[in-house]
Every structure is written in C-alpha cells, then in structure tokens.
Amino acid sequence: MQELLVDSYGRKVSSLRVSVTGRCNLRCIYCHGEGEVRGGSEITVDEVAQIARVAARHGVDRVKFSGGEPLLRRDFEDILAALPPMRDVSVTTNGTLLAPRAARLKECGLDRVNVSLDSMDPDRFHFITGSPNGEQFERVLDGISVALDAGLTPVKINMVYLKGVNEDEVDRMIAFVRGKPLVLQVIELMNFRGAFKYHADVAALEQRVKAQADRFERREMHRRTKYFLGGAEVEVVRPIDNSEFCMNCNRLRVTSDCKLKPCLLRNDNLVDVRGMTDDQLDNAMRRAVGLREPFFKGPVPLRPDKVKMPE
C-alpha cells in the first residue's frame, strides 16, 4: 500500500507543480515567476522524470508544468513522454507557441492546458504582457483554437483581474468561453514586481458572478467555487490573505533549477535534489513535505520576515 505524503497540518500532497524554465518571451506586469530565486541550470528531462516517478510512489498522480514559458523548452515533448502514468498532466502557458505543437503535446501525454489571456483587446494585451507586436495576441487566440481541436480540454483561460485595466472585460471573457470546452479563471493579483497598484476587488466581483449564476459547486482543490452562467463555467481564484486557499493546498512545487519548494511565497526552505539517487530523493521529498506550512493561517502571514519575493 502506498504511503501518502502528508504534512504536519494534515494536508496530503497529490500534485506536483514543476517549473521547467525561468525564461519567457513575454514580460507580464504581474508575473511572479513561480516565486523562484534562480541560480542553477535548468532542470533536465531525466530529473523531471525521476521526481515524478518517486512522487508517484506516494500516490501523487497529477503534475502541472509552468515556467517562465514552458514551451520555450524544445524538449518539452520529451519531458511529457518520460513521465510515469499520471491521472492528470497539464501545462500553464502564455499560448504564443502553442498552436504548432498542440497536437504533438497531446500525443506525448499532455491532457489539458491553461492559457493566460487577460484581455480581448490587443492594446490592453500589449500593455499587460509587454509583447513587442500585435502578432502575439493573435498567436494566443490561435493557440486556444488549436488546443481545442487537439482535445487538450478543458482549456482554462487564466485572466488576472487588474484594477483600471481589464475590470470591465469579465462579461466579454465569459461570452468568449460560453458554449465551448473552456473555463474562465479570474485570478486575484498577487503582490509581485510592484504591480499591486493594479489590485482589484475580487470579492465584489465574485458576488456579482454568483448573483448571475444558474448554479455553482465547490471544487476540492483549495475549496474553490465553480459558477455556471448560461453555458459558461467561471472560477474566481483568491489566494491573497486566504487561509482557506492555503489550508487546502495539495501541491509540492519543483523549481526550474531542480529544488523542491514547499510554498510559492517562501524561499527559505528549499530542498536541492539534484544528483540524488531515488532513495535519497524519496527521503528529501519527505523532508520537503515536513517543511510545508500554510503561508496564511489566519489574518497574519506566516513569518513575513522570512519571505523573499522575486523582484
């Protein structure tokens, strides 16, 4: 029988979030870079496969890949093909490189994608992402379309909710996902890179969405609520000062330079696993899980003096 990875707060780890690169071809104003302070070389195909294989011994059956922009890795298909059997394999991408590779990604074992799209307006998209030309916006839309055709569904659209920038676009984004295997995730802005001046009132938005919904249901992950509005599925993601979000976290992160990262918002408890045998990695994984603590346990963050945010 598998021995599950459970931290001292009773939170079972069932998911990995693996950053495969710190590189990106966009410069989004809100990017948190997976909370990394990077130093070493990029994680290799074999390292990802080993971490996933050892985690699977303990019942971990989900992996989500992120970056930077993971599709900047030319060997990303090799990473997918090297994984042990998993119940769910997904990637978060900005979508600009997705269209030419979507079908092959599906063949190599990818189940679904999250695509960042904060605005349906090309000028706003340019402002938010720092993209050098209007072609990137069209590439994202093409990427979503091809991902749907390839069966990488449900495609989740990640929209970071930004005060004075895209607050008026939620209804337009709901219309965009309606009637398709798309899910709109409206995400509260986190305080990285000095972008918190764009923080908007997500609580008020959620109340408005709830009032318009035909029905809603609770997700196990972070106890989030799904709202269904006339053929559109919407989730509102509220990680800021949210003890419920943290207390239901089931994820162990892996940095792009091959360290286990127990919490997005801390860098004082990383566990370097590069060059380990499977048994050494197994012990290191148990140690990393033992270091997990909810960052928000209540009104005051955990050990704010120890938090090192990316610039």
Image (tube, rainbow, N blue to C red):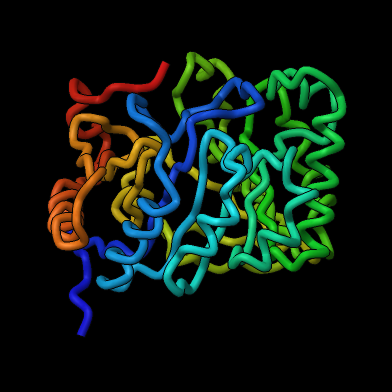
Q: Position of residue 33 (x, y in %)?
A: 47, 30
Residue 177 position (above or below residue 121): below
State left or right for residue 222 relative to residue 233.
left
Question: How many tags in the picture?
Answer: 0
Residue in the picture at 43% in, 61% down: 221
Q: Position of residue 17 (x, y in %)?
A: 42, 51
State left or right for residue 125 relative to residue 26.
right
Q: Position of residue 3 (x, y in %)?
A: 18, 75
State left or right for residue 268 relative to residue 181.
left
Residue in the picture at 71% in, 60% down: 104
Q: Quadrant of the N terminus?
A: bottom left
From where the camera sits, is residue 280 visible? yes
- Considering every residue shown, the one lying at the far bottom of the view is 1
Q: Quadrant of residue 192?
A: top left
Residue in the picture at 67% in, 39% down: 94
Residue in the picture at 34% in, 68% down: 60
Residue 16 position (above or below residue 263): below
From where the camera sits, is residue 213 visible? no
Q: Position of residue 34 (x, y in %)?
A: 43, 35
Q: Quadrant of the C terminus?
A: top left
Residue 304 position (above or below residue 179): above
Closer to us: 218 or 31: 31
State left or right for residue 33 relative to residue 69.
left
